[in-house]
């Protein structure tokens, strides 16, 4: 049987917008994970950064991703990027010391929760300034945070470990 053409397959050679190397996109401009730097694009990275301060699906805005790539760092959203993501998408995740934390908006405020703790904030700014893990402010320990990202659909144990970067 002949294989049917699938526009969602990554059939098109293109230049990675972060590292400039060869990567592949589907017919809608979404790129597969860049084999060189790991970047993924939805083809509108500049627009998403300008309008929302993020990229999709990786969250890190394009200009910051380019800086991190140049500095030889892994892509990682700053707390500011993460908050932009929270404004954009409403449900976010990160890991700290092997534990997953969920951050989501509820009734105009923000809920910050893990398996054994839940903190509520009336505004996103209050979350940014006061969210803490065992009394240590999140904004002060962001360097220790691993894989801040948009929440993705998964079963309970799919969040036990951060996904591969
Ligand atoms: Zn790349």
Image: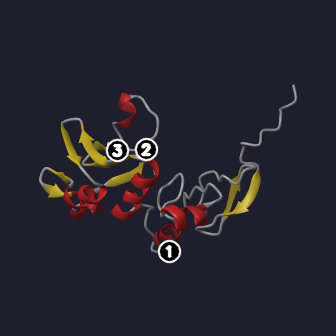
What colour scheme was applied to this rendering of the protein? secondary structure
Q: Is residue 114 above or below residue 147?
A: above
Q: Is residue 53 above or below residue 57?
A: below
Where residue 125 appears, as percent x and y from the top left, is: 28, 60
Farthest residue, direction top: 1
Q: Is residue 88 above or below residue 52?
A: above
**Residue matched to label 1:** 70
The residue lying toward the viewer, choosing from 139 and 162, is 139
**Residue matched to label 3:** 104
Q: Is residue 27 left or right of residue 111?
A: right
Q: Is residue 16 left or right of residue 159?
A: right
**Residue matched to label 2:** 163
**Along the polypeptide, which appears first: circle 1 or circle 3?**
1
Q: Is residue 98 left or right of residue 148?
A: left
**Along the polypeptide, which appears first: circle 3 or circle 2?**
3
Query: Does mark 3 have its CB less than 8 Å from ligand 1?
Result: no
Where residue 112 appears, as percent x and y from the top left, is: 26, 45
Where residue 86 appears, as percent x and y from the top left, is: 39, 52
Residue 163 picture quarter: top left
Measure the alpha-carbon separation of dots 1 and 2: 23 Å
Which element carries disc 1, helix, strand or loop?
Answer: helix
Which element carries disc 2, helix, strand or loop?
Answer: loop
Measure the alpha-carbon separation of dots 1 and 3: 32 Å
Farthest residue, direction right: 2
- Classed neighbour count for the residue bearing mark 1: other residues with Cα under 10 Å, few (<14), some (14–19), many (≥20): few
For the point 41% across and 62% down, the residue is 81
Asked if the residue at tag 2 contacts the one at tag 1, i.e. Cβ–Cβ closer than 8 Å, the answer is: no
User: Which image quadrant shows ligand 1?
Assistant: bottom right
Marks 1 and 3: which is nearer the front? 3
For the point 20% across and 40% down, the residue is 118
């Amino acid at each position: 049987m002949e294989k049917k053409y699938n526009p969602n397959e990554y059939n098109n050679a293109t230049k990675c917008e972060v590292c400039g190397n060869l990567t592949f996109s589907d017919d809608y401009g979404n790129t597969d994970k860049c084999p060189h730097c790991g970047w993924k694009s939805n083809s509108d990275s500049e627009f998403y950064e300008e309008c929302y301060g993020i990229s999709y699906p990786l969250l890190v805005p394009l200009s910051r991703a380019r800086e991190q790539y140049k500095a030889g760092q892994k892509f990682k959203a700053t707390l500011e990027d993460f908050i932009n993501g929270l404004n954009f998408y409403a449900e976010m995740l990160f890991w700290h010391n092997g534990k997953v934390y969920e951050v989501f908006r509820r009734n105009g405020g923000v809920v910050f929760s893990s398996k054994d703790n839940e903190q509520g904030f009336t505004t996103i700014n209050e979350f940014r300034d006061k969210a803490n893990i065992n009394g240590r402010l999140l904004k002060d320990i962001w360097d220790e945070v691993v894989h801040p990202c948009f929440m993705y659909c998964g079963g309970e144990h799919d969040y036990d470990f951060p996904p591969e970067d």
